[in-house]
Amino acid sequence: MNKYCFGVDIGGTTVKIGLFTTEGTIVDKWEIKTNKENGGEKILSEISASLADKLTEKSISKGEIEGIGIGVPGPVDAKGTVLNCVNLGWGVFNVAEEVTKLTGITNVKAGNDANVAALGEMWLGGGKGYQDMIMITLGTGVGGGVIHDGKIITGTKGAAGEIGHMVVNYEEEDSCNCGKKGCLEQYASATGIVKVAKRMLAKSEAESTIRNKENLSAKNIFDAAKEGDALAMECVEQLGWYLGTACANIAAVVEPDVFVIGGGVSKAGAILLDVIQRHYEKYAFNPHKDKEFKLAELGNDAGIVGAAKLVIK
């Protein structure tokens, strides 16, 4: 008998769902709308209904389902309890237990979406072949996930791996969205890179192709740096310094085999990895200097892949 599992990635706008074999092959993937009405009370029931419909469509019995893994955009402890997921309107409750009640499938596990995406990259993506990995996601914010011995490090309250909120600049005067000042997210996110570039442009009179760029973006900055724009390259160097030193500090605590860089900013490619690794090696403790840096490979599928892995032995 074939065995299957579901990987579910709950986002603020859509819920991504994948049906997998237990070997990791995607059989089908689809999306449903995230219904946040009335504090998101129908989200899990609508997901469960969608899973049931897919089983019917594929003529798969519940007995062939190994389990259901779920990634949630908020802190989740090791037992599957969500600890206030404000983006969905959820308070504190056990997601895994609720989905078991709704579906009748007992093997249900939940985790923070960034951590789950890291698990996906370890299983089938940029971290494949490694058991100890740090994932850093550079998007609108900076997310992260810590994998040790093939398992997610959740922390006591499900909030481990918040790499974006490491303080890297004690002289910063502007506040991060979290309320602190000087977080990595303020410099290494897509919005943070642009903010740093605008500060540099204001302090310099040097010619630059990004100076009068309308709707300046991280992509504009990296493209200009690749073309030899000195000021753009200075922005990229500063980004590399923040990320490289942050990774050196992380390695001093958990010593991973590999750092996997994902998110929209990672599309910059080799120039990004090179600048991070160069600064990393400058500040890393000597036994840690040989760590690898790789790009994430799964894109938007990382969440559903990692969610599936939660329930696959």
Image (spheres, grey):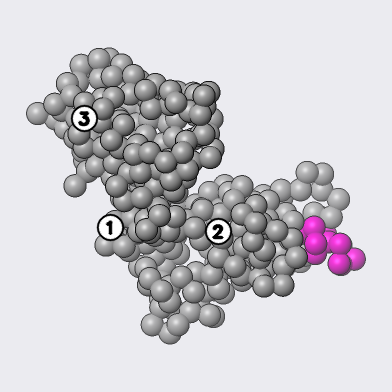
Query: What residue is shown at x 74% (from left), y 60% (from top)?
Result: 174
**Residue 301 in sight here:** no
Magenta residues, start to end: 197-208
Q: Is residue 308 above or below residue 105?
A: below
Is residue 93 rendered magenta in the image? no
Residue indicated by mark 3: 105
Identity, as a three-letter code, of the amino acid under mark 3? Ile
Where residue 312 is drawn, which disc sits there? none
Q: Nearer the viewer, mark 1 or mark 3?
A: 3
Identity, as a three-letter code, of the amino acid under mark 2? Gly
Q: Is residue 270 above or below residue 216?
A: below
* Distance in Å between CA atoms under marks 2 and 3: 35 Å
> Residue 9: percent from the left, percent from the top?
41, 36
Identity, as a three-letter code, of the amino acid under mark 1? Gly
* Distance in Å between CA atoms under marks 1 and 3: 24 Å
Q: Nearer the viewer, mark 1 or mark 2?
A: 2
Local packing at callout 2 (Cα closer than 10 Å; few below 14, some 14-19, many 20+) is: many
| Left or right: where 200 falls relative to 89 | right
Residue indicated by mark 1: 150
> Residue 234: percent from the left, percent from the top?
72, 67
Which element carries disc 1, helix, strand or loop?
Answer: loop
Q: Nearer the viewer, residue 242 or 72?
A: 72
Q: Earlier in the sequence, mark 2 or mark 3?
A: 3
Local packing at callout 1 (Cα closer than 10 Å; few below 14, some 14-19, many 20+) is: some
Residue indicated by mark 2: 164
Q: Earlier in the sequence, mark 1 or mark 3?
A: 3
* Distance in Å between CA atoms under marks 1 and 2: 22 Å
Q: Nearer the viewer, residue 103 or 39?
A: 39
> Residue 134: percent from the left, percent from the top?
41, 61
Query: What residue is shown at x 72% (from left), y 72% (from top)?
Result: 171
